[in-house]
Amino acid sequence: MKPETRKEEIINTAAKLFKEKGYSAVTMRDIATAMGIKAASLYNHISSKQDILKDIIISLAEAFTKGMLEIKSSNVSTIQKVQAVVKLHVDITAQNTYGMASLNNDWMHLEEKRDYYLSLRNGYEADFRSILLEGVKRNEITDSNVEVMLFSILSTLRSLYLWIPKKEDVSPQELSKSLSKVLIMGINN
Amino acid sequence: MKPETRKEEIINTAAKLFKEKGYSAVTMRDIATAMGIKAASLYNHISSKQDILKDIIISLAEAFTKGMLEIKSSNVSTIQKVQAVVKLHVDITAQNTYGMASLNNDWMHLEEKRDYYLSLRNGYEADFRSILLEGVKRNEITDSNVEVMLFSILSTLRSLYLWIPKKEDVSPQELSKSLSKVLIMGINN
DNA sequence: TATTTTAACTAACAACTGTTAGTTTGGGAT
DNA sequence: ATCCCAAACTAACAGTTGTTAGTTAAAATA
């Protein structure tokens, strides 16, 4: 089913530890011990500690960028686009909750790739903002503070990695649906 | 106006650095250099690195607990209670954005005080949950997934520390108001 | 003026960090 | 049987870590 390579095993083990303690607090010896080997053996598969972080973060960031590109170019209502963004986050996060922790909290420790990551992130935010602005223009979305809406929705979606593991009984489909409802309709009756 | 003690100066400098790189990546020498002194000199004022973290986090966590206690015991509508919770977060965060970063991201490095922090945090969440449940019972709040509402609102409020510094032109009053509106009424038109 | 306190300093420590070099082991291909 | 190679190992490195001990200069107190 899943012929996981040794390198992928290292990356997944590291991501799990990074989520618990953060990148800087995890040592190569921690990762190795968790796998039952010695730290030096890790270097048969990866080139540096930073390389592990890069592999975790960049692939996720590119997945988000790719997903946003499809949503942006789709010909549907603004509400449907927002629902698609919610689904994108739920799906990617459900598949890799550990990696999402690093994406959110450890990106500043990317050295060479930091600027590239930030450009992807800024582009993503800009795309989402323009979806919302278009929705206001089309009268599909309240004409109040778009920045606040953007911030509120993205904050919630970026925190999913903390919450999904605690609610394993909820399927991604259900979660996307109820989350979209709350974000779009609010909580009042 | 602000007769800041040397100890407070250390704590504020540390909090700023902790926000940028995380607790583990900041060294005592980093903190000292930022203040123009040597690392060993810090120990005339604080007892350990962990002690700095504890001072940052516990005071904030207790401020939230205290604020929630007042809201819980106030005799107002559920919507007004939610608005009060939003205001509580905006006010505390606006006053100490650096510390809020540690509260959110570095609490796992509290050693002796970790369990105490977690008990405050869990109590806070439980109180907020019971406010929402009461609102559903009173028909003030949609009878859909309360856990999703709780998660969504708290995620947004806990991310304020990232957003407030970028929008310095927005006053806490305005922010509380527009944020409450988005969280309660949603974004649809 | 004499004395105590505050808050800085230098020097050093033992432990830990990421990483490299060189070696060994065992299984698959020739 | 021989070779190859992936993947583990041991040993060690140079630099960094939080922290302590002991000292010093200036400011506050007596």
Image (spheres, coloured by chain):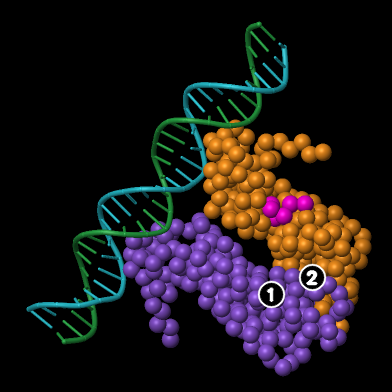
Chain colours: A purple, B orange, C green, D cyan
At 79% from the left edge and 66% from the top edge, which residue is drawn? B130
Q: Look at label 2 and name its amino acid.
A: Val
Secondary structure mostly taken by the magenta-highlighted segment of the chain: helix
At 43% from the left edge and 86% from the top edge, which residue is drawn? A1
Q: How far is the residue under mark 2 from the one under mark 1?
A: 13 Å
Residue segment shown in magenta:
B95-100
Mark 2 vs mark 1: tell me if same chain.
yes
Badge 2 vs badge 1, beta-carbon distance below 8 Å: no
Q: Look at label 1 and name its amino acid.
A: Glu
Side of B68 where A109 appears, left or right:
left
At 84% from the left edge and 84% from the top edge, which residue is drawn? A137
* Mark 1, residue position: A125
At 51% from the left edge and 63% from the top edge, which residue is drawn? A111
Q: Secondary structure at mark 2?
A: helix
Taking depth in this image into account, of A73 and B3 the one nearest to the observer is A73
Side of B31 where B1 appears, left or right:
right
Q: Residue A187: x percent and y percent? A: 82, 75
Query: Is residue B97 located in the magenta-colored stretch of the structure?
Result: yes
Q: Quadrant of residue A46?
A: bottom left
Q: Secondary structure at mark 1?
A: helix
Q: Classify mark 1: residues with Cα within 10 Å, few (<14), some (14-19) or many (20+).
A: some
Q: Quadrant of residue B11?
A: top right
Circle on res. A148: 2
Count of numbered labels shown in the rendering: 2
Residue B184 shows up from this direction: no
Q: Residue B49: x percent and y percent? A: 57, 44
Residue A149 shows up from this direction: yes
Label 1 chain ID: A
Label 2 chain ID: A
Q: Compared to A33, does C27 lie above or below?
A: below
